[in-house]
Image (spheres, grey):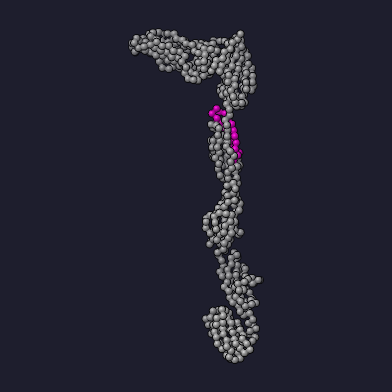
Amino acid sequence: MRTSLLFAGLGLVVDLGAQVTYTQTLPLMQSVSSWTTFDFTATPPTTGPGTLSCQWLACWMSGFGGNEIWIEFETAGGWQQVLYQGGNVTECTYLPASSVVSASVLGEAIAFGGGQIHGRLRATDNCVAGWGCSFSSDPNVNALTLEYTAHEADFSVVDPGICPGSTVQFTDESINTPTSYAWSFPGGSPATSTLQNPVVQYAAAGTYDVTLIVTTANGPDTLLRPGYITVHPPPPANAGVDEAVCAGASAQLQAGGGLTYQWFPATGLDDDQVADPVATPAVTTSYTVLVTDANGCQASDFMILTVQPLPVVVASAGNNSICLGDTAFIVATGAQLYQWSPNLFISGTSGASVLAWPTSTFTWVVTGTDVLGCSADTTVTLQVNPTPAAPVVTLNGPEVTTTTVAVDYQWYLNGQPIPGADAQSWMPIVNGNYSVAITDANGCSAQSLPVYFGTVGMEQAMEQELRLWPQPADDRLTVSGVSGAWPARLLDATGRVRWQGVLEVPRTAIDVHGWPAGLYLLDVDRAGGRQTLPVLVR
């Protein structure tokens, strides 16, 4: 009947059928008073404990105490003592020493060395130079030998810790020339194999057993390594949340879950190999980060960085031209919020519209911000045109005329516009105060002072017996055509009496020198009733 043993802590199940013996003897090691390292090579798995033996010598003198020897094997838990002998008071004589190395320590040392055992040893030497037995090479150790019952089936891999989806190359290290192989890979693909050195892929994270059965001249031998293959879980790659930025602005990406990072594409990134690069893409971009953890396992995630277009801000006041002294209404469009600067000649610094009254051509900057918080600037310039000089109205016979040349004209009678009176001259049809407003090529206007026109009906008055001349009068006004002594008064436009007297035959001269130009009324008391005649003074 075949017997199997499970060695706890070694991850090793062996079949006691088909057993062989491993033995190796190392050459003489001299001057081992300090730690001296050594290796037992080509060490197959063990089915149990082993025997370690050697011969050692050291100098000794009475009164200095006994000599000692220590031998240790290296394991994953550190150095483990496997042989100790003390109290050696034999002078310069090889003494035998041996010990049983437990199955657990031996198995751990074989596993840690990956097919060889790393060891170290040292011995004490108690003598004074020149006294007693003294050699330059002592203490020394000879015929250091390790012997144990070995396992024929054996295999190795470069790294039993892999990432999901990776493959493992199994290398047969069995002894005694196997004639057949039967592998079992639970969780792997393929799950079984009869090849000597199969390649197996593992898709999911976890720990997996591996079993190898070989057949040699000694019969079948089974090696089970529980949990031999570890498939590390992939890192929890995280590229961060989706973000949005305004065109021309930057965002700092933030990845996590790994040890190193690689971003794709690198376009717009200040560094594509850090967890938190600064991204300034020209267009909306999907960024993928490849995350690698301490085990070399990789995973990826992506985020979308949306680039929002800037608002197109437009500000206008019609043709952006005003006349000096006027106020313009400027309106901005294309955004939700607006900021105006500088705060000069405008009614406010916020809002979609402002009133502006610059005294000369002036420019403002308008910053518009949309609902997404993106901002853009524009400028608006108001050209300020000077107003034309005020026109002068002159009396030219039956017409009133302005001497100023303009694009447009509008005549007024007593402050009211005269329909159709839009030429440089106008012929009044009624007496009154006449003025004119002109408009130049820039659309700017100016208005004259009013001038009184009172010669409407003058011809009718001249047909009567009274004659007033010259009209208009400069220095004096002559009145003729009276038939007796007629009381008379000369009134200005406000009704104030400027002259009062009697009109006599054949004529009367009235001094008007220095009088303000304008319309006056001559009020005459004559036989047959009162008569009022207009008089112009210039």
Indicate whether 59 appears above or below 232: above
**Which secondary structure is most common in the magenta stretch?**
strand
Q: Residue at x 34, y 9 (%)?
A: 62
Indicate whether 119 appears above or below 320: above
Residue placed farthest to the front in the image? 529
Q: Which span of residues is magenta-colored?
A: 286-305
Quarter occupied by residue 219: top right
Can you give x and y, in whole percent of width and height, for residue 74 in the image? 48, 18
Q: Residue at x 53, y 18 (%)?
A: 9
Q: Is residue 360 left or right of residue 122?
A: right
Image quadrant containing the C terminus = bottom right
Residue placed farthest to the right in the image? 420
Question: Is 406 in front, or is 260?
Answer: 260
Can you give x and y, in whole percent of width and height, for residue 504 in the image? 57, 90
Q: Residue at x 62, y 85 (%)?
A: 531
Residue 92 seen from this side = no
Can you give x and y, in whole percent of width and height, for residue 106 in the image? 51, 15
Question: Is 162 in front, or is 385?
Answer: 162
Indicate whether 109 appears above or below 418: above
